[in-house]
Image (cartoon, rainbow, N blue to C red):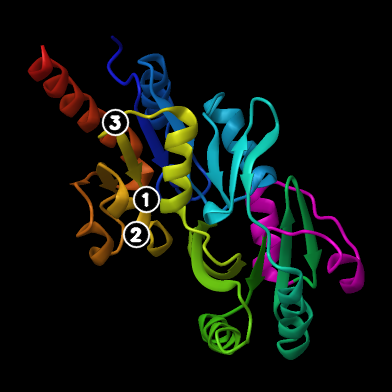
Amino acid sequence: MKLFEGCLLACDVDGTLISDGIVPERNVEKIKYFLSEGGAFSLATGRTPSAVNSILKVLGEVSPSVLANGGVIYDFKNKKSLFSLKIPKNDRFVLRDILTRFSGVAAEVHIGELVYGFNDNTESRDHEEFEEFGLERCSFDEMCEKDFEKIIFFATSEEECNRVFDYANNLNISSRFIKTSAFIKGRKRNYIELVPQGVSKALTVKKLCEILSVKKGCCFAMGDYYNDVEMLAASDISGVPSDAPDDIKKIATRVVGEAKNGAVADFIDYLSQVRTATLKGSI
């Protein structure tokens, strides 16, 4: 029996797997080892399919993954969604509403492998360059006829981001707003995302465990930010980089090194020790 047979490691991307757009080589080596030992390594990220192409080029292979903060399970090998939630049509007015009220704010609408852009500012341009996708363009009316999975709003200051978030949370909609972040060009960026109600990395990782026939006690998770909290708490063993917020670290089974130094590699080393002891104990 291979060491990680029947196991899943669901791993956040920004601030966990990568730091400032770079996947440490140690992470690449250990992920390949995890896969070679029978494990399933899945991304669990707010990104959508088009926004992880640069990461796939480095890793070479990942298992079906949780994208859009839990709104999608995507099979990269077969290029298809295994599970997907959509923002209700009645909530799509939010796109026009926020961009009209806050003229300096930009937005991306994510639909499968396509990303549509509205307005531009320094934050949205840096985000597009960082995630290496090309933007599609269309009118508001055309956009509202599409079935989109999430919207990201980009403000140019933390104060404006908070104003948009406060305004958005008073809108009468069934979808929900969450705060996310990414470390780009040496600086942490804060974003606001609109996602379908019920979207959760934790719930979708659980669904992924069913799809992949993960064994009881073998669901592992790693993340660094508040949109990872439920996933970390629901997993059997969780890991957090040492440069994550202190209240996130309190949730983890194991706090490892910094993301830039290969936190995922550290966590896989720890899991190897745990699994080795577990398998020895079962003999």
Q: Which residues are magenta?
A: 121-149
Q: Which residue is mark 3?
A: 268
Q: Return the residue found at the far left.
A: 281
Residue drawn at x 72%, y 79% as measured from the top left: 94
x then y, percent, for residue 225: 38, 60
- Residue type beneath disc 2: Val
Disc with the residue nearer the chain's start (2 vs 3): 2
Q: Which residue is mark 2?
A: 229
Q: Nearer the viewer, residue 126 or 180?
A: 180
Disc 3/disc 1 C-alpha distance (Å): 13 Å
The local crowd at label 3, few if under 14, some if 14 to 19, many if 20 or more residues have their Cα within 10 Å, is some
Labelled pair 3, 1 in contact (Cβ < 8 Å): no
Quadrant of res 165 = bottom right
Task: Kindly identify which numbered label has been placed on residue 223.
Answer: 1
Quadrant of res 17 = top left
**For residue 62: magenta?**
no
Disc with the residue nearer the chain's start (3 vs 1): 1
Q: For the residue labelled by badge 2, is the local secondary structure a helix, a strand or a loop?
A: helix
Q: For the residue labelled by badge 1, is the local secondary structure a helix, a strand or a loop?
A: loop
Looking at the image, is mark 1 or mark 2 nearer the viewer?
Answer: 2
Q: With 143 as the anchor, is 28 left or right in this view?
A: left
Disc 1/disc 2 C-alpha distance (Å): 8 Å
In the figure, 29 relative to 91: above or below? above
x then y, percent, for residue 25: 42, 29
- Residue type beneath disc 1: Gly
The local crowd at label 1, few if under 14, some if 14 to 19, many if 20 or more residues have their Cα within 10 Å, is many
Task: Kindly identify which numbered label has been placed on residue 43.
Answer: none
Q: Nearer the viewer, residue 162 or 251?
A: 251
